[in-house]
Image (cartoon, rainbow, N blue to C red):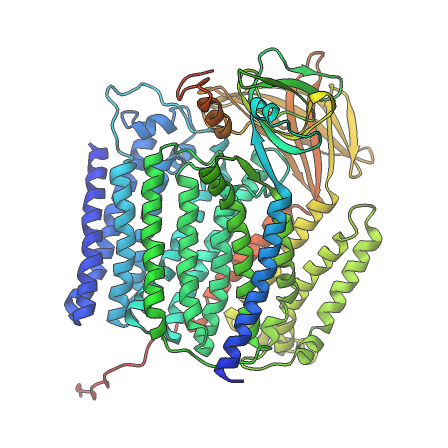
Amino acid sequence: MTRKQQRALLLIGGLALLGIAAGLVLYALNDSIVFFYTPSEALARHVAEGQRFRLGGLVEKGSVRHDSNDAVTFTVTDRDRAMAVSYQGQLPDLFREGQGVVAEGRLGPGGVFQADSVLAKHDETYMPKEVADALKAKGVWKEGSTP
Amino acid sequence: MIAELGHLALVLALATALYQTSVPLYGASTGDLRLMQAAVPAALCQLALIAFAFAALTWSYVNSDFSLANVYANSHTAKPLIYKISGVWGNHEGSMLLWVLILALNGAAVALAGGNLPPGLKARVLAVQGSIGVAFLLFIIIASNPFDRLDPAPIEGRGLNPLLQDPALAFHPPFLYGGYVGLSVAFSFAVAALIEGKVDAAWARWVRPWTLAAWMFLTIGIAMGSWWAYYELGWGGFWFWDPVENASLMPWLAATALLHSAIVVEKRNALKIWTVLLAILAFSLSLVGTFLVRSGVLTSVHAFAVDPTRGVFILGILGFFIGGALALYAWRAGSLKPGGLFQPVSREGALVLNNVILGAAAAAVFIGTLYPLALEAVAGDKISVGPPYFNLTFVPLILPLLLLVPLGPLMPWKRSDLKGVTERLQAAAGIALLIGVATFAIRARGPWLAPFGIALGAWLIAGSFTDIVERCQLGRMPTTAALKRLAGLPGAAWGMALAHAGLGIVLIGIVGVTAWREERIMVMKPGDAVSLAGLDVTYVGATPFTGPNYTADRGRFVVRRDGQEITTLEPEKREFQPGRQVTSEVGLHQFLTGDLYIVMGEGRSGGGRSVRIYFNPLASLIWFGALVMFIGGAVSLTDRRYRIGAPRRRPRLAVKPAEQG
């Protein structure tokens, strides 16, 4: 085997594998990315029932209701529009009324967001970054203030 | 006063680093030996100065000097001593200081251990190492000074994020940074080689142990981070494909590839150009990781820094080193002489395949991690790329590699035949098949693919030891002679077998948790019982409890099997005083077959409490496997070729005939 052949073989093999990898990446990106919306954005875009997305905003004060067995409903608001969320499972430690939250799931019948995961990851200002950015853009919340 | 001295030491270290960058480089280009040798004391001096600055910051933390803004923001008098110390690097400024400390440590180690390096190469390596120091010291002094004062000084600090107050996480950053920054040495060697226009076996023999050490630190650092996420975050998972985790996985993949390609350079003098590129890319990914975690562009508990000037500064450093090194590579790579030829089916070919797959996998992780950031910057859309993406890309890319791992080490250099290699692996394949079938038979549920995963793990473990078993001829020779041979095998052979087997152990753990986890989520009242995985768990109740800097509800769960009491688990719900942040302490019992894992939620009206109970089969194998990989690396480092005069180039001058008589 000459040097040229060796190089050609390496190149072809490498490119073939890279092609597979690129195909997988494109397919997966098409299939599995999830958009982030505030309630206003989700309603303005008329998100279809059953489409997966992440809903972010503040947990409306007084809206959290625990049902019998760990089912919970609450309302997520961006101080403009609001969306009802239902969730079956244990809420994270950092979940509190009046504070930021990100829920991932699908829009169910009746416009209720069926969450399958609820995140309340954030820094010491109790605000997930995406939620803070969205609220800042709407002028509802400023850096350093408590909503 | 101490803080001001620490600050002064940092400024002096910057001056030293500038000297270390310029003078030896000039000396190497003019052939002035004296100027070249100036790099050694400069590197040592830089280490001493940065170590002093680090000690000064640690002193301020231990003594709770809240006149320092950094200590005020991240410490508290009521915090236990270990977390006062770990608080030094549990924040942005301090962790950058730890970063440069480890960088200086690496530089000084090259200066001291590189006695037999050719002076020109050594001077250039230390100069490049110094230039990285210049960039990051500048960053610390200008944009993230840990010694900023507050006036008037507050009486009490704000405390460290309680999630970070944990032994595994206290030592996670030093290990992780040891890995990140350890790769800087391979980078410096690559850039120095490009300047010199020479890469040879001696070069590779130098690069490999440093890469191996960095890889070991990364492995343990990632394992610690994952262990922390497992039992401190209380979500029951061990890996979340969080950008911060990916930031450490990418350099690990690149370091793993580099580790393997450096063998080809060392043994066969081939793949030189590729290896140099890989060394540059590995450290570049470390820098990208540092940028991701430290610039605050991510939504994550790790992103303490929310200051755009810092992000731009780190991005500038990133652009300079990655861009500069790649430009130098494009310009100079042609001057490196290509090395030996090999057939596609050979040890070299196997290692190339390893590199290509690892590279593709790292690229998939890279795209999944950075695409959301790029899209947000360009289009303003916020998206998240989660586990489904990585399951669809990373997993199918890496699985064939796992299947092929046992084949590579059995292939001879230059040319090999698949038939001979597969024949030698028959025993290993038999064991794997047997274990797979057994798993299939005893599993009660779970995906049908899972037994294949277990068999693949067994194949990795059995295949890894095939070479060792053959080489000592166990069973064919008297046992004592065979054992003697076993002990006499080189460290590298043992190290490789252990590291590959560790990978198999990790895989079995991952398959176990993913396929057969049992989960119960419910509201429990005192006296309620639930059964899972053959265990009965009874909730006795919760009592209030006061810790050093928190108050807690401590639950009591009695675990029984067939009516026999086995253990009592006490998960906690803690509320930390400064900030009133709430965390969960997981109640964890490790059985041989898996982990019982209990997380307690909030109390409900009527004395109920929401509770999550998991049984994670084989979970502890994940971290045990990582430890085995680490030990494999350590054993490989003891190989005698790294100790005995090996990394020496042919002497240029003939030794003078003995004059003493």
- Nearer to me, B182 or B476: B182
Q: Quadrant of the N terminus of chain B?
A: top left
The correct choice, above or below, for B542 with respect to A37 in the image is above
Q: Position of residue B286 (x, y in %)?
A: 42, 51
Residue at 43% of width from left, 57% of height from top?
Answer: B282
The correct choice, above or below, for B472 with respect to B404 in the image is below
Q: Quadrant of the C terminus of chain B?
A: bottom left
Q: Position of residue B634 (x, y in %)?
A: 48, 61
Tally of marks: 0
Q: Position of residue B155 (x, y in %)?
A: 31, 18
- Nearer to me, A16 or B611: A16
The correct choice, above or below, for A128 with respect to B144 in the image is above
Query: Is B342 positioned to the left or the right of B515 in the image?
Result: left
Q: Position of residue B206 (x, y in %)?
A: 38, 68
Residue at 43% of width from left, 52% of height from top?
Answer: B285
Residue at 59% of width from left, 43% of height from top?
Answer: B239
